[in-house]
Image (cartoon, rainbow, N blue to C red):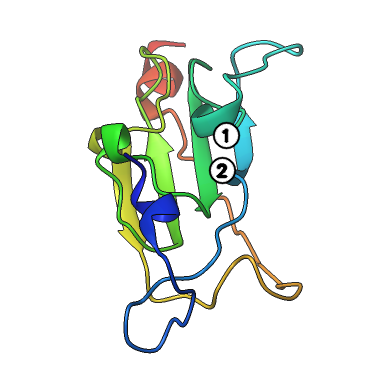
Amino acid sequence: SQPSLRCATMDDVHTRCRSRGGDGCAFVVQQDSSTALGEAGMGLGYAGIRNSVAIEFDTFFNEELEEPYENHVSVHTAGWRGANRAHQTESLGASVRIPDLTADPHAVRIRYTPAIDVLADVLA
């Protein structure tokens, strides 16, 4: 059963129950292909994309992904060889210490600085 649907009273004060949104969304930087498209639903549009990093804004609890029960932000990658996944084993870090993502607009700043491929420079 889905804990997100178990709550009889949405009071948020005593039971920590509240209505949930859809699965969420993700900001993705990838070098797989110009038409790369990941899995929908709990895959948040990035699961399955190789050579990618995703910052997910997750608003729905998916027990099978071993993710936190609360809304959370998480950074996911499987490196340059593997296909990215929304499972917590691929998370570089996550936080539930965020505002409720299903209420009000939120401003987010993402800063991405790619590493320089030193080995390629040495071999060239």
Q: Residue 72's quadrant in the figure?
A: bottom left
Above or below, 17 against 46 in this view is below
Q: 10 Å neighbourhood of mark 2: few (<14), some, or many (≥20)?
A: some
Name the residue tied to disc 1. 44
- The picture places residue 26, in percent across and down from the top left corner, at 61, 43
Q: Is residue 82 left or right of residue 11?
A: left
Q: Going from the N terminus, do you reach mark 2 or mark 1 first?
A: 2
- The picture places residue 91, in percent across and down from the top left corner, at 31, 42
Circle 2: residue type:
Asp
Residue at x 57% of width, y 29% of height = 41
Between 89 and 12, the one lying in front of the other is 12
Q: Nearer the viewer, mark 2 or mark 1?
A: 2
Between 8 and 12, the one lying in front of the other is 8
Q: 10 Å neighbourhood of mark 1: few (<14), some, or many (≥20)?
A: many
- The picture places residue 4, in percent across and down from the top left corner, at 42, 53
Q: Secondary structure at mark 2?
A: loop
Circle 1: residue type:
Leu
Residue at x 32% of width, y 78% of height = 15
Between 68 and 33, the one lying in front of the other is 68
Q: How many marks?
A: 2
Quadrant for the N terminus in the image:
top left
Name the residue tied to disc 2. 23
Above or below, 114 against 35 in this view is below
Q: CA distance from mark 2 to mark 1?
A: 7 Å
Q: Residue 78's quadrant in the figure?
A: top left
Q: Secondary structure at mark 1?
A: loop
Residue at x 37% of width, y 40% of height = 62
- The picture places residue 104, in percent across and down from the top left corner, at 74, 76
> Circles 2 and 1: CB distance less than 8 Å?
yes
